[in-house]
Amino acid sequence: MVIADGTIVPDSLVPDSADAVLTVDNVFKRFGPLAVLDDVSLTVTKGAIHGLLGKNGAGKSTLSNIIAGLLRHDGGTVLLNGEDVSALPLTARKKRGLHLLSQHSEIFEDLSIGENLLLPDLPRRLGLTTWPALHRLAGSLLESHGMPVDPRRRAGDLGASDRRRLAIIKAVAAEASLIILDEPTAGLAAAERLHLLEWVESLTERGTSFIYISHHNDEVRQLCSEYTVLRDGKVTAGGKAAELSADAMARVITGADVTEFHRIREDHPAAIELSGLVFAGGGPVDLTIGRGEIVGLVGLLGEGPQELMRAMGGLLPIEAGAVVIDGRQARLGSPGQSLGSGVAYLTHDRIGEGLVGSMSVTENLNLGNWPRSLGWLVSGAGMNRRMREARGAMDIVMGGGSQEIGELSGGNQQKVLLGRLLERKPRLLLLDEPTVGVDVAAKEQIHRLIDDATRKGVSVLLLAQDPEEMQRLVDRVVIFSKGRIARTLRAPR
Amino acid sequence: MGCETKSFTMNRRMLLQGAAAAAGGLLLAGGERAAAQGAASKIVAWETGYLGFFFFVVLQEALKRKVEGLGLEFVGKDANGDANAQVNDWNSLLLQRPRYLISDALDSELLIPLSKKAKSLGVPLGMVDTVLTGGEVAASVTFDNKQSGVMAAEKTAELLTKKHGSPKGSVLNNYGSLTAVALRDRKDGFEDTLKSKYPDIEIISRPQNNQHEQALAVVSATLRERPDLDAIHMPTDIFVVDARKALETQKRLFPVGHEKHIILTSIDASPNALEWVKAGEIDADIAQDPIAYVEIVVDLLEEYTLKGKPVPTGPYENKKYFWEKGTIADSPSGPLLTIPPYFLTKENADDPRHWANVVTQVWKMQQNAG
Amino acid sequence: MASKKFLLDNVVWILIVVFSILAGFLNPFFLSEGNLQNVLVQATTLGVLVLAVSFTLLIGEIDLSVVGNLVFSSMVGAYAMQQFGVHWTLAVLITIAAGVLVGLLNGYFVAYLRMNSLIATLAMGLFLQGAVLGATQARTMVVTDEGYSYIGSATIGNWPVMPIALFVAYLLAHIVLAYSAWGRNLYATGGNRRAANAAGINVKRARLGAFIASGFLAGLAGFLYTSYLGGVSVTVGSTTLLYAVAAPVIGGVSLFGGRGRVIGMLGGTLLITVIQTGLQLINVSAYYIQMIGGAMILLAIAVDAFRIRSEERGIV
């Protein structure tokens, strides 16, 4: 094993090759001058769940794409069940039992669960689909894999965790020997997450192996029997997961000691007043937010907290009531008006609602807030100056400002989005899942940036599924029920 | 009708033939029924393949005036260049059981089955301009497009001989869309004549696809490429404006007789062309008479078909038109009158029977809008 | 690697050179100065129409009414001169204003009434062309005014003036699209409408603006067209519309919005014009011209698809 600073010597690794379902040997990959994978080796044991860890941009996705055959590597070999598959495309590897299930598991929402499961080999007679046979077959498959649902139901009506189950069963039914799961629990509530993990574990009893890519270190420690950590394209650690403590794991991932961040809680003079605010999906809401205060919003989906944020951000109509900021009534009729009034909304949907994929990093940072020259032209120098400042202040890791935004890792994309909002000098930040799909190190940095902003007097409303994030950041929590505030809890000093 | 209506004359033989045909029982029973039914209707149906060019507008206007002059009702449809739309139009017009249906075909084959359907429905058919290559048509009137091309070629050769002493030099034929039979015939007549009879005349054959911008572009490019170009032939007057524009832009537009004049010939004899011929700006223009087309076809249908008689074949004479004499022959689709082409010249330009003069002086219609 | 990307990005220019050499081989006149003038003159009207379509493609919509708008606006301008004897400069403004009005309607339909642009503008185009047919009774409206037709027929020292309009239009379009705040808003709106909205861009206004720009350019094309031909008739070919949509795509403008460079639009225009004029000048039988033209465009699009695929392969 290649050993870098802060790594753990994996003495228990290197299992018998006869036992290995997958062997990656000295794989090398470069994009232009940049080596994204540098002599990466790993072995997945038959029937094991192999955790693949690392920050965003460490090379996890590149590696999994190379293993699956989506990307061609520049050096090294990939052995599947002892056969060299380096030169085979995705479809040929799939036939040999290797399946990649990406974050957005592809299901056809308007087809039935049974069709989704059996496509493209639907049972046919005379070229026509025989529906009863299809439903019988799909039903028994679902049953035997611990997912007893009616195969005739529309797949789009399934919940997020059942959708992932469906994709996994489809792969298992195709006699997969190795399934790569990329962030399978992203966006799931804690209870669902646990259920899904237990279920995946039960599948290994049939001899199926998994590569499990996740940001949740605790999940990896619970679930995986072995693991590999990537940092900057190199393997920095590997071995049996049980031997690793949580702190040690965080350290090998980031390459540095994670300093625990503590927010100092103090009193905040009132600055923003929501009175009788009625919006699409909730209200009336009365709430006073202090200057520099972070108020956490808690409530199930559809109970009002997200709708409140989106309404104040100008994305949902406000039907009645007023928002007064520093004694002045804010106009919140559109995102443009909200931003103009000092209210900035950070979306939870970074790809769909945050970034413009066809534009550069610099342009995404300046989007809708172009520095002007001559009144109507965009000042290139102004854009670049902001980019330099943001890059320095937020530690954005990137090649250059003219790079397309899609080439950045999730954490860095999120920093660009936050940077865009902070450039507007907001009085109130509405943060909707600010660290979704972001690695440990970037999460830490984003928390610091939020804290820094409050020190400069910015008030924050925060919505986060992650209880740890809530605990760390908020000064006060308001609990929503049926569109209204049900309770307020003050965080302990 | 602005013009006085004049029944056409026929010679004795034709009349005899007609009588003999009737006596011989050549009249189909269906034809008689058709005549009986059709006569009840006052509606005359018209389907034009394309209304986008002035020639077809005149064709439609002539029919409308003729029909209204007879106290009948005119219903018209435009297929806008789409042969399929024309089939649909025919079907819906036939549903109304008009007195008769007159049409200018976009596709000479496609409409043949429908002509049989019309017959079985008892609606007589008249075809003008582009006629059918088969089927059941009561009367057809067309123009000898090929002959017009031949005449333009002979004229060009004659003028080149005058210029160079012998038939030699170069001529641009900026031909139109070849999906139109009429334009294809004109191209063949023009180019085949030059090729076979005058091997020393170089033909530069380039398409303009019935588009003004292409005609202008091609003539411009050819003028630049060939500073020595002797002659230009356009297959229809519609695109002579573009040739003139190209000549004008390059300062090479000179009147007939000027030593730098480029020989210009065309076909149609439209109102514009009449002015150019009078002004000596175009060497020769060959007339194709849209007004005669529809007037004659209506006359034939009223005179014979509706009275249960077949249109007789043989020579046809009508002093109302400048060309006066033509021939009705048997064609695969039925009796067909072919109007002979003739030159519109400076000398005969004022004859009121030219369709250009009818349009401008009697109808008071302008070719150029505004 | 970098040079390969450069080659692929500029493939349209390479194709122009290849086709020109091919055509020049078959007819040497093709490579002469006279024909260069000819190509540029022919490219002018098409080029401005291509810009018109491109503005709407950039926001992920399409304007199929540009040819109808061209005929309509130039008829309005010609009518104003003939009926009211307005000065030609005013007639030019009227022509363009008519185009803008049509664009405004299209934009309102698409941006505010949320009508599908493909169908709405197709219908608008049919309506306008039909309106012109009805109003002129298929007669050509001849424009004899020397001022109005100056740009279409004048030469300076043997060089036609018309292509100047082409280059000025493209230069301005480049400045507006690449450097103006409004232009960047168009790209952002086309790239991700929801994100543009959330970033405070007035998306509806940007979308309306793209259609107004399209109408403006269609009106300008109408003026240039009439000036060039010395008149306006309803028979502008339907192939013109197809070329006006194909050219930006050949030049790398995405049909899904957000991507496309002005230089590519120019390349697409010139490539199509080169193919067209090449086929006019080499004596191919007219029966095959359409087929060859179609095959050439297909080839250009295929090369472009190859470019996009090889770009995507590098990045995951």
Image: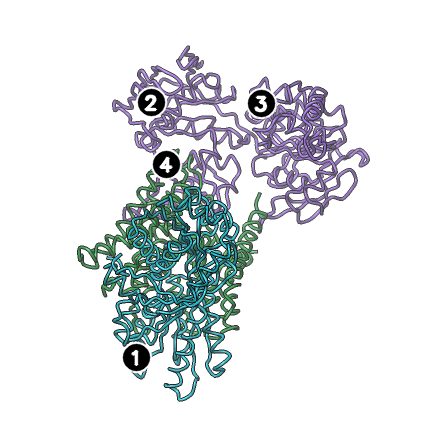
Q: Which residue is mark 2?
A: A318
Task: Estimate how packed mark 3 is, as few (under 14), some (14 to 19) or many (20 or more) residues with alpha carbons within 10 Å.
Answer: some
Find the distance from the CA under tag 4 to the CA under tag 1. 76 Å
Q: CA distance from mark 1 to mark 3?
A: 84 Å
Label of residue A158 in the image: 3
Position of residue A208 in the picture relative to residue B160 (left or right): right
Mark 2 element type: strand
Looking at the image, which residue is at 35% across and 62% down?
Answer: B292
Circle 2: residue type? Ile
Q: Which chain is the one coloured purple? A: A
Name the foreground residue: A93 vs B272: B272
Which is in the foreground here, disc 3 or disc 2? 3
Whether residue A384 is visible? no
| Chain B drawn colour | cyan
Spatial distance from mark 4 to mark 2, Cα to Cα?
25 Å
- Tell me residue C90's x, y (percent): 20, 55
Q: Chain of mark 1?
A: B
Closer to the N terminus: mark 3 or mark 4? 3
Q: Are marks 3 and 2 on the same chain?
A: yes
Return the chain for callout 3. Answer: A
Secondary element under disc 1, as helix, strand or loop, is loop
The mark that comes first in sequence, 3 or 2, is 3
Which-is-in-front pick, marks 2 and 1? 1
In three-dimensional space, the C-alpha distance between marks 3 and 2, rounded to whole angstroms, equals: 31 Å
Location of residue B112 in the rendering, given as x and y in whole percent from the top left corner: 51, 53
**Labels 4 and 1 in the same subunit:** no
* Circle on res. A423: 4
Question: What kind of residue is marked 4?
Answer: Glu
